[in-house]
Image (cartoon, rainbow, N blue to C red):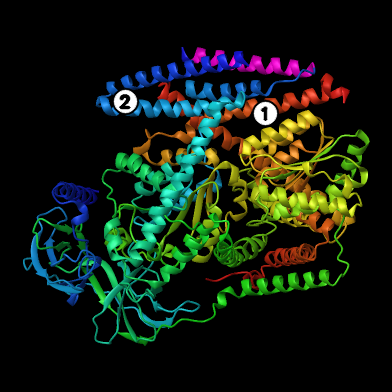
């Protein structure tokens, strides 16, 4: 136990020394660009601190540790506070104040838009929502929640029906052949280009068969045997290909984020690349 | 190019000038600009009509605007001379342009044919406050041709036949329609009351000038008592090209409709789907036998429980990170109930680490009830279901620890999962457990598919829950969804056939208007 | 010199993979930290040695590019920043090149955000790109940032009929009615193109559902790779084009640079990221091959 504690203290000491060295070095670099000393010290600290946090998060790849926990909790706390501040300024000050009070509008320097009594309804619902924090009268917040759930459900039902149901169903109405001008024209211009006739025609087939078999896979009222069984097998293949593509995209996305952090470390912090 | 450069430089200059003066008077103290400034020609181009809505600080806001000063210059970067100062309030200013009389008028100027066959109608399926103006293009408008001399159509509207006519908007040459949409807010600038007579003029604009006429540029300035405290617009162009007005058309009135017929397809689908759902739920409540096929995933769960019994090792059940209100978690409770019942029957161990305290309470009740059902209330141990932590990765670390220490025969993951899905499933695979997962988080399914022996994909999770629980609401909804899916399949096939036979009527049934 | 370094690094990675193959065929466990190390190397090497590849726009990206390019000058284009700093490395290159393209074509640019973090990212883009590359563009005349409003898709539901019901001012506190760019702009329906750049909720999908479809306005987007596959069903009828992940951004950047001589020296973070992407993907593919080989032919695989 004592050995672990000693190692932890040693690591902490190394981290502090490296942090100080980086801060001083970065301050020097900023000063060389003609920045005043005060700003250089500030920016030097900010870049060093950002690099420290990045490396702290990376350290999780080795093992969970206090540095990772510190960075993670800092991130969670800062984001929560940021969202709260933006919410206050954009919703409360931006939307509510200009509709209820001229004095407050002038205080917050937003243009007054004239009194509107209806704006007190969301205010009351908002206050009711905050009552959740009380264990005695917390039930009142359910009225606001019911309002949110009800309106969102109603709003979404129509939009989903339209965009994700009707429009998507009609998107499967696709021609069997795209721009058919006879076999001669088809074979003379046979290209594997993504906007070529062959590929477009094939993708139409894939769309139709994929949607059809995919739905059959998720059809629970009939046993998967015979034609249904075959079609649902095709459906599961389509799903697996989709998951594969989605997995590949995820890998690409994660690598991009890693590249972003490494670019910060190599460029902004260490100055290895330009 | 040169012309554009000049405008750009001028804008820069003004921006620069604005910046300099901003140092003296803070921006927040300056008056707001008037809005919706439009400048259009009248009297054959001899007159420029400048129209604006008052500044936000005119009679309201900071209430410091004492009037508006108008400046004019033949070039955007030339020296702007003040032409007049007008009092505050909504305003229209008529500027008689200086005509260059030295230019010799060489014969009658070109005059485009006016638009004809203008029809005015209220816009359908809206809340009112909009009129659709349609016309037949000018005989001189040869849209698409490089020699076309007609540039655009301006639409003017007035509330009485004699005017004043205000410009509402512009349509390009070749266009035959303009939707004049106003605001329904009484205090808005472009408030367009319903049930009011409107008259329209459509102006055919060309690209040519009268001899001696040219373009001018105007600057409008909001002024205050303090001559240094003002705000001005960038140069606004007055377009002095030749035009011909149509005759006056109207009157027309706009009004709102109670029912948007464009959304009928949506209404039909909503009614049908709701009706089937309610009907199926009623049937399920009355105890009708609603067939749901056996899911391979459920069989896998049964097999896995059997295997755990044989091996004498416990079963780990993870409910995910969702709250107790989420559908995936609710579905997971049903499956947990079934698993717990089997576990109680076979006297196998069960471990349920929870992320959410409320989920834990519900899970405890579920497991307890299952042990009762199985007739083994004595075997129930409250410590089977326990709360871990509400920190995502700490929870994962704890569950991973359980997997590696207890080496459960089977790991079941059902519910909402996020970034932890792969970490959990990977550790379980390393520990050699049989793994069954189910989630409706599409982004996480691929991870479960690669690392688990069996995965319930999306809706299968709900289906499994309905199959096991026979809960009327779940079962009825599931059946209703199946009917909807059958309908989709039939519609897709019919649509596929009709579009290939070029029968557009069927496809048009699915067109949702706005 | 740098070529030599590159070759040595690639040789190290190759030799390491070979070592991994042999080890795993022998049935030995490969610790996951070693895999992290390989990915770290595969990403760092192309960054340090600046390896880039040329990109060609695929139809789905080209569709978005062509739309912006073919709109008449002075069209109104709205760009929504629906992301936060955590997603920025992946999607910021998209918003950057879109801003450049829109302003280079002399369109009117409206910036907003459905994510709270989008507001400051939008302001940062104004400082970095517009002030840097387009000093002649004036805030309030050529572009405007109206910022963020809470309400997710509810915001879209309102501004699809009226901006001013939710937005009284731009981020600078100026009344929308005092801004020339807002002359004649009432709602999203007055836009000629809506573009959402993001990757979570709310994002491109919500723009299609709550703005594009009901308002009948062409809608396009840029999306983080993770959610890109879920958006393909909307292409091309409900969503005219999409940049999916950094690859989409790189394609757009190349297409833009090919046509705009003036921007041939602009930074191209998307294209730069494709070097590390390519090598990282090759390494991951090698892992998949190694994993399968050891499963089918290795000692451990045969045992089970």
Q: In terms of secondary structure, what is the magenta stretch mainly?
A: helix
Circle 2: is it few (<14), some (14-19), or many (20+) Cα within 10 Å? some
In the rendered view, does B365 fall on the left or right side of A273?
Answer: right
**Bounds of the magenta segment:** C3-26
What chain is tagged by disc 1? C
User: Please, what secondary structure does the residue beneath circle 1 have?
Assistant: helix
At 46% across and 66% down in the image, what residue appears? A124
Report if residue C90 is visible in the image.
Answer: no
User: Please, what secondary structure does the residue beneath circle 2 have?
Assistant: helix
Q: Nearer the viewer, mark 1 or mark 2?
A: 2
Report if residue B78 is visible in the image.
Answer: yes
The disc at residue B346 is none
Query: Which residue lies under the disc numbered 1?
Result: C285
How far across and how far down the image is residue C211, in percent? 50, 61
Query: Which residue lies under the disc numbered 2?
Result: A41
How far across and how far down the image is residue C50, in percent? 47, 24
Which image quadrant is residue A223 in?
bottom right
Q: Is residue A1 above or below residue A77?
A: above
Badges 1 and 2: C-beta atoms under 8 Å apart? no
Which one is nearer the viewer's eye here, C30 or B47?
A: C30
How far across and how far down the image is residue B327, in percent? 70, 56
Which one is nearer the viewer's eye here, B284 or C68?
A: B284
How far across and how far down the image is residue B160, in percent? 28, 86
Q: Is residue B90 above or below residue A240?
A: below
Which one is nearer the viewer's eye here, A249 or B507?
A: A249
Residue C237 inside the magenta-drawn segment: no
Query: Marks 1/2: CA distance?
Result: 45 Å
């Amino acid at each position: 136990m004592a050995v672990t504690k000693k190692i932890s203290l040693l690591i902490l000491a190394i981290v502090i020394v490296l942090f100080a060295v980086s801060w001083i070095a970065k301050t020097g670099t900023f000063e060389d660009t003609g920045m005043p000393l005060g700003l250089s010290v500030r920016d030097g600290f900010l870049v060093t601190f950002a690099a420290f946090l990045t490396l702290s998060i990376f350290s999780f790849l080795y093992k969970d540790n206090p540095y990772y926990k510190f960075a993670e909790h800092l991130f969670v706390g800062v984001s929560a506070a940021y969202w709260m501040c933006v919410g206050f300024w954009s919703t409360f000050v931006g939307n509510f104040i200009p509709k209820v009070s001229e004095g407050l509008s002038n205080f917050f320097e937003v243009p007054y838009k004239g009194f509107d009594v209806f704006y007190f309804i969301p205010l009351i619902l908002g206050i009711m929502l905050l009552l959740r924090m009380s264990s005695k009268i917390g039930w009142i917040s359910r009225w606001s929640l019911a309002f949110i759930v009800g309106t969102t459900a109603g709003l979404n039902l129509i939009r989903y029906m339209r965009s994700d149901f009707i429009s998507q169903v009609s998107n499967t109405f696709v021609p069997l052949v795209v721009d058919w001008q006879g076999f001669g024209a088809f074979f003379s211009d046979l290209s594997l280009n993504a906007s070529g006739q062959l590929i477009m025609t094939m993708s139409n087939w894939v769309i139709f068969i994929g949607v059809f078999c995919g739905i059959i896979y998720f059809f629970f009222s009939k046993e998967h045997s015979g034609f249904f069984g075959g079609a649902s097998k095709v459906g599961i293949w389509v799903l697996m290909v989709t998951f594969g593509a989605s997995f590949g995209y995820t890998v690409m996305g994660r690598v991009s984020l890693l590249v972003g952090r490494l670019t910060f470390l190599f460029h902004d912090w260490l100055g290895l690349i330009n | 190019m040169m012309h554009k450069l000049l405008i750009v430089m001028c804008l820069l200059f003004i921006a620069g000038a604005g910046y300099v003066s901003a140092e003296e008077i803070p921006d927040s103290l300056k008056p707001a600009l008037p809005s919706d400034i439009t400048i259009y020609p009248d009297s054959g181009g001899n007159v420029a009509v400048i129209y604006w809505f008052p500044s936000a600080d005119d009679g309201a806001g900071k209430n410091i605007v004492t009037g508006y000063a108008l400046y004019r210059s033949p070039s955007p970067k030339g020296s702007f001379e003040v032409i007049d100062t007008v009092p505050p309030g909504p305003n229209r200013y008529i500027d008689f342009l200086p005509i260059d009389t030295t230019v010799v008028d060489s014969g009658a100027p070109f005059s485009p044919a006016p638009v004809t066959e203008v029809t005015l109608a209220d816009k359908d399926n809206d809340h009112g406050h909009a009129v659709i103006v349609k016309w037949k293009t000018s005989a001189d408008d040869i849209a698409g041709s490089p020699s076309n001399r007609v540039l655009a159509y301006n639409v003017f509207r007035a509330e009485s036949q004699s005017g004043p006519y205000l410009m509402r908007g512009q349509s390009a040459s070749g266009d035959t329609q303009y939707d004049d949409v106003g605001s329904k807010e009484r205090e808005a600038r472009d408030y367009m009351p319903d049930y009011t007579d409107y008259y329209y003029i459509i102006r055919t604009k060309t690209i040519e000038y009268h001899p001696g006429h040219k373009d001018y540029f105007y600057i409008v300035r909001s002024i205050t008592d303090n001559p240094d405290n003002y705000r001005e617009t960038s140069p606004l162009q007055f377009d002095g090209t030749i035009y011909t007005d149509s005759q006056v058309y109207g009157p027309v009135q706009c009004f709102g409709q109670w029912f948007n017929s464009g959304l009928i397809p949506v209404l039909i689908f909503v009614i049908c789907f709701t009706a089937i759902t309610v009907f199926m739920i009623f049937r399920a409540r009355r105890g009708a036998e609603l067939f749901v096929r056996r899911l391979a995933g459920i069989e896998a769960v049964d097999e896995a429980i059997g295997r755990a019994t044989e091996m004498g090792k416990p079963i780990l059940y993870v409910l995910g990170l969702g709250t107790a209100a989420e559908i995936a978690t609710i579905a997971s409770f049903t499956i947990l109930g079934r698993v717990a019942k089997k576990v109680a029957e076979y006297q196998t161990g069960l471990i349920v680490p929870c992320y959410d305290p409320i989920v834990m309470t519900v899970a405890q009740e579920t497991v307890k009830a299952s042990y009762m059902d199985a007739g083994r209330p004595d075997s129930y141990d409250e410590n089977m279901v326990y709360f871990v932590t509400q920190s995502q990765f700490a929870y994962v670390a704890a569950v991973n620890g359980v997997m590696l220490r207890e080496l459960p025969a089977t790991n079941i993951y059902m519910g909402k999962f996020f970034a932890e899905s792969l970490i959990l499933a990977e550790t379980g695979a390393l520990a050699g457990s049989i793994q069954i997962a189910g989630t409706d988080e599409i982004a996480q399914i691929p991870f479960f598919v690669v690392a688990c022996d069996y995965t319930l994909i999306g809706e299968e999770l709900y289906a499994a829950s309905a199959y096991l629980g026979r809960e009327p609401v779940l079962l009825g909804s599931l059946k209703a969804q199946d009917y909807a899916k059958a309908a989709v399949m039939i519609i897709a096939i019919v649509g596929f056939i009709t579009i290939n036979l070029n029968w557009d009527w069927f496809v048009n049934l699915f067109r949702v208007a706005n | 010199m740098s070529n030599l370094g590159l070759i040595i690094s690639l040789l190290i990675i190759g030799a390491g993979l070979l070592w991994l193959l042999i080890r795993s065929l022998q049935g030995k466990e490969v610790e996951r930290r070693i895999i992290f190390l390989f990915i770290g190397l595969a990403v760092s090497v192309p960054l340090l040695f600046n390896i880039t590849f040329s990109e060609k726009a695929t139809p789905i990206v080209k569709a978005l590019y062509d739309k912006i390019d073919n709109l008449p000058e002075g069209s109104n284009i709205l760009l929504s920043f629906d992301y936060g700093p955590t997603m920025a490395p992946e999607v910021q290159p998209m918003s950057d090149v879109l801003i450049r393209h829109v302003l280079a074509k002399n369109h009117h640019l409206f910036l907003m955000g459905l994510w709270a973090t989008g507001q400051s990212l939008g302001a940062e883009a104004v400082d970095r790109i517009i002030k840097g590359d387009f000093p002649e563009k004036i805030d309030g005349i050529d572009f405007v940032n109206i910022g963020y409003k809470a309400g997710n898709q509810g915001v879209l539901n309102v501004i699809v009929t009226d901006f001013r019901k939710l937005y009284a001012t731009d981020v600078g506190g100026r009344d929308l009615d005092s801004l020339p760019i807002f002359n004649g702009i009432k709602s999203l329906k007055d836009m000629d193109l809506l573009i959402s750049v993001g990757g979570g909720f709310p994002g491109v999908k919500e723009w299609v559902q709550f703005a594009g479809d009901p308002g009948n306005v062409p809608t396009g987007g840029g999306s983080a790779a993770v959610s890109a596959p879920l958006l393909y069903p909307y292409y091309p009828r409900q969503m005219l084009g999409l940049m999916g992940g950094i690859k989409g951004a790189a394609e757009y950047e190349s297409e833009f640079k090919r046509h705009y001589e003036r921007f041939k020296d602009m930074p191209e973070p998307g294209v730069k990221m494709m070097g590390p992407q390519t090598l990282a993907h090759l390494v991951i593919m090698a892992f998949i091959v190694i994993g399968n080989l050891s499963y089918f032919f290795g000692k451990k695989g045969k045992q089970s």
